Image (spheres, rainbow, N blue to C red):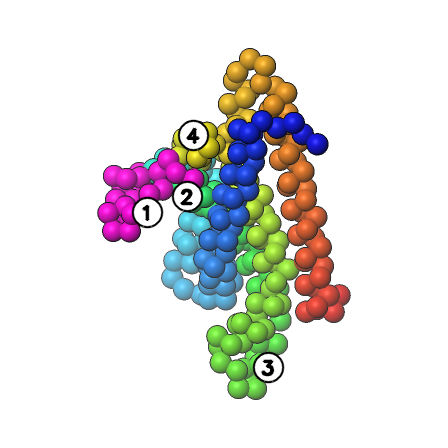
């Protein structure tokens, strides 16, 4: 359908892998933070909420620079991970996944938090009175009821990660085959003579992938709603 070059296909595959890894790795943290913000009152809750949503209002370049400072090979966290576990983020595709996950995390948390807040607490109380423990209630009642919101959050996270550019290029640069995502490839192609056609092909691919993700999200959300809410 599209006569993409091997380098362009590599950018597409790399973007999909980075977005998927970013979404999967961010999901458990997103669920935990969303539940904490939705169900608990504690000192510093507003501060935590602000920190979670900070990537939405900060320039992406600032977020990428902070990641480079903290997770670079000379950074406090990056140096520890490199020397202890041999894990390197800076200028690697794993660093791109980290940057995309950080930038998309607020959208993931927001969608899941709203889903938790919409759950009728009486259903959880009923399960508790029948002898279910707190974790079992969360696993068998809360999570299934929140599933549409979790799916929506995952799709938003995936879409944001797929299109992330500023933080990624600042943290891991624009290395073909390693960190050059679709967004970075489009930017590169627009800077060279005769690259407009190739850039347009990647733009169309991006639109198709994003649209397919949204359609799939709507379908899964409807299925989850029919199963757990009887809609």
For the residues bearing labels 1 and 4, Cβ distance under 8 angstroms: no
> Which circle marks residue 94 in the picture?
2
For the residues bearing labels 2 and 1, Cβ distance under 8 angstroms: yes
Q: Could you tell me how far apart the alpha carbons at marks 1 and 4 are, in whole angstroms?
A: 19 Å
**Above or below for 158 versus 201:** below
Q: Could you tell me how far apart the alpha carbons at marks 3 and 1 are, in whole angstroms?
A: 45 Å
**In the image, residue 127 lies at what x, y percent?**
58, 81
Position of the C terminus, as image quadrant, is bottom right
Note whether residue 5 is visible. Answer: yes
**In the image, residue 163 lies at what x, y percent?**
55, 37
> Which circle marks residue 126 in the picture?
3
Q: Could you tell me how far apart the alpha carbons at marks 2 and 1 are, in whole angstroms?
A: 9 Å
Q: Name the residue: 50% across, 60% down.
A: 31
For the residues bearing labels 4 and 3, Cβ distance under 8 angstroms: no
**Above or below for 160 versus 113:** above
Task: Please tell me whether residue 79 belongs to the stretch shown in magenta.
Answer: yes
> Which circle marks residue 87 in the picture?
1
Secondary structure found at label 2: helix
Label 1 crowd bin: few (<14), some (14–19), many (20+), radius 10 Å: some
Mark closer to the chain start, 2 or 3 = 2
Position of the N terminus, as image quadrant, is top right
**In the image, residue 54 lies at what x, y percent?**
44, 44
Q: Could you tell me how far apart the alpha carbons at marks 2 and 3 are, in whole angstroms?
A: 43 Å
Question: Within the image, what quadrant is residue 175 found in?
Answer: top left
Secondary structure found at label 4: loop
The boundaries of the magenta stretch are 69-94
Q: Is residue 41 left or right of residue 201?
A: left
Q: Which residue is mark 4?
A: 175
Mark closer to the chain start, 4 or 3 = 3
Q: How many marks?
A: 4
Mark closer to the chain start, 2 or 1 = 1
């Amino acid at each position: 359908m599209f006569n993409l070059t091997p380098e362009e296909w590599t950018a597409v595959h790399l973007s999909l892998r980075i977005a998927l890894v970013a979404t999967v790795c961010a999901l458990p943290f997103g669920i935990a933070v969303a539940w904490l913000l939705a169900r608990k009152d504690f000192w510093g809750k507003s501060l935590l909420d602000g920190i979670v949503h900070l990537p939405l209002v900060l320039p992406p370049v600032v977020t990428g620079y902070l990641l480079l400072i903290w997770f670079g090979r000379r950074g406090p966290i990056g140096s520890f991970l490199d020397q202890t576990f041999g894990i390197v983020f800076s200028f690697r595709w794993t660093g791109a996944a980290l940057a995309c996950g950080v930038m998309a995390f607020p959208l993931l948390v927001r969608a899941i938090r709203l889903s938790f807040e919409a759950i009728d607490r009486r259903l959880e109380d009923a399960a508790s009175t029948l002898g279910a423990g707190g974790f079992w209630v969360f696993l068998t009642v809360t999570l299934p009821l929140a599933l549409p919101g979790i799916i929506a959050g995952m799709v938003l996270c995936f879409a944001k990660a797929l299109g992330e550019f500023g933080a990624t290029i600042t943290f891991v640069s624009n290395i073909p085959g390693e960190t050059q995502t679709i967004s970075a490839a489009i930017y590169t192609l627009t800077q060279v003579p005769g690259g407009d056609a190739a850039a347009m092909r990647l733009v169309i691919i991006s639109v198709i992938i994003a649209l397919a993700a949204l359609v799939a999200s709507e379908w899964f959300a409807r299925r989850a709603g029919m199963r757990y809410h009887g809609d």
